Amino acid sequence: MVNKLGKEFANKADIRIDINEFFERFHLHDEHFKEDPAFHTVVLASVNALKSTHGPSRVYMSEPNKTFKVSRTFAMPALSEEDDPDMVTVSGSPCVAFTEQDLGNGRRGFGLVIRKSSEDKADLRTSMVFGIYGTYDKKDQMMRIERLYTPEFADGNVLSEASPIPIDAENVKGAIYYAMLCADKIYSHEPFMPRECFERALNVQLDKVDTPVIHKREP
């Protein structure tokens, strides 16, 4: 079984997608996306993009009472030796978050991440299951993909944390299809299992799935 989306090795190509089509496919104009300035730096740091101090950032968090929640349980220290420690569960909803930044000279940067937990924003990579960053000119609206992050199946068939993958047309299409599956689960408030989305993306014929059109520009 192939453990990565698309080809394992590829030179970085000039791959572009229409930023407006990307917004449409991921429903980024949906009213359920709420402004959250804290996610601006979270998104940019997650995809290793240039830092900026401000930018419009929005996030869609699945409703905790309607969907699976990633959680961890730990023991709170007892008040005395005679008391049993209290068990406390901390959980966070899966989320889709994106931000933009002004790069000057009519250019903009765009980043989007999908996280299996919206809590602990400092825990960037272990919570991120998908990440993308690109730049585009405001005149033509064609975003060049600069960075792309997906997990992979590691030893023991365990899904790893998201890491950079080579940028070519096949990888971009496969990664975006995987991200669309993840986002649909979050938007529909269904149990979110990144592994199921990843396996489905690995085993599909990419030329048969509908994603934003991939444009490859020759050097």
Image (spheres, rainbow, N blue to C red):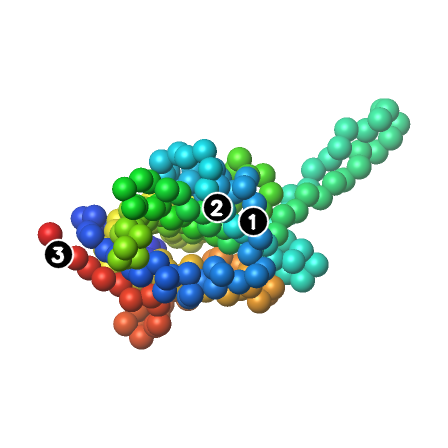
* C-alpha distance separating marks 3 and 2: 32 Å
Residue 36, percent from left and from top: 56, 45
Report if residue 1 is visible in the image: no
Q: What residue does disc 2 label?
A: 56
**At x 63% / y 48%, what residue is drawn?**
92
- Specify the amino acid type for callout 2: Pro
Please tell me whether residue 6 is drawn above or below residue 124 in the rendered image. Answer: below
Q: Earlier in the sequence, mark 1 or mark 2?
A: 1
Residue closest to the eye, 157 or 169: 169
Residue 80, placed above or below residue 93: above
Q: Secondary structure at mark 2?
A: loop
Instruction: Please identify the residue farthest to the bottom as the structure is shown.
Output: 208
Left or right, 132 with respect to 62, comes to left
Q: Position of residue 195 (x, y in %)?
A: 47, 58
- Closer to the observer: label 3 or label 2? 2
Q: Are marks 1 and 2 in contact (CB under 8 Å)?
A: yes
Mark 2, Cα crowd under 10 Å, few <14 / some 14-19 / many 20+, is some
Q: Residue at x 27, y 42 (%)?
A: 105
Q: List the residue tagged with mark 3.
A: 218
- Write the residue at 70% across / 59% down: 65
Please tell me in which quadrant of the rendered image residue 19 appears: bottom left
For this view, does 218 lie left or right of residue 58?
left
